[in-house]
Amino acid sequence: MSTFMANASTVERKWYVLDAAGKPLGRTAATAAMLLRGKHKVDFTPHVDNGDFVIIINADKAVLTGKKLDQKYYRHHTGYVGHLKEVQYRTLMAEKPEFAMAQAVKGMLPKNSIGRASATRLKVFAGAEHNHAAQQPVVWDK
């Protein structure tokens, strides 16, 4: 008996909805990264992008445990000398919760072409409504 190896032509992608309301940001991001990568499938193949689409709703209601709202910072550099920008997570979650969730998921994906392709299948919404009802997404509650 030979081992099954998935390829791009055999991949079937589904749509899943994750509700982040009242759940830790990192826990939701880890679940989303697992679904985007395809690790929940029995035919997971490491060198093939066989993940699914993920819709995260209620990103503004995700919680950060401990003192992370005050002690954790999102940092990025503009490329100019001395232009390191810092934003406290309390501000980031109030103004752009979709960005905070997307960055958390992106950090949990592999840093290669498969990770970049997987990140494009992530859709994050601050509220409970999303515009992907035509794809008939299934609620992921495991």
Image (cartoon, rainbow, N blue to C red):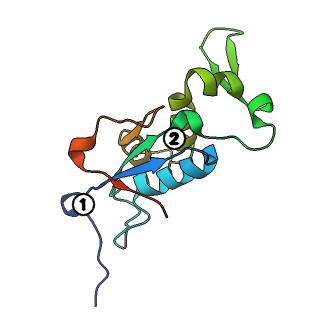
Judge whether 22 appears above or below 14 on screen. Answer: above
Residue 124 rendering spot, x and y as whole percentages: 44, 36
**Residue type, label 1:** Val
Q: Is residue 83 left or right of residue 12?
A: right
Q: Which residue is mark 1?
A: 11
The tag on residue 73 is none
Residue for point 53% across, 36% down: 59
* Foreground pick, 87 / 28: 28
Q: Quick one: which residue is furthest to the bottom in this view?
A: 1
Q: Which residue is mark 2?
A: 106
Counting residues from the N terminus, which is met first, the one under dot 1 or under dot 2? 1
Residue 47 rendering spot, x and y as whole percentages: 38, 60
Graded by Cα atoms within 10 Å as few (under 14), some (14 to 19) or many (20 or more), the crowding at tag 2 reads many
Q: Is residue 89 left or right of residue 114?
A: right
Judge whether 128 appears above or below 52 on screen. Answer: above
Measured in 3D between alpha carbons, the distance from the residue under mark 1 to the one under mark 2, in whole angstroms, is 22 Å
Judge whether 120 appears above or below 39 on screen. Answer: above
Secondary-structure class at tag 2: helix
**Residue type, label 2:** Lys
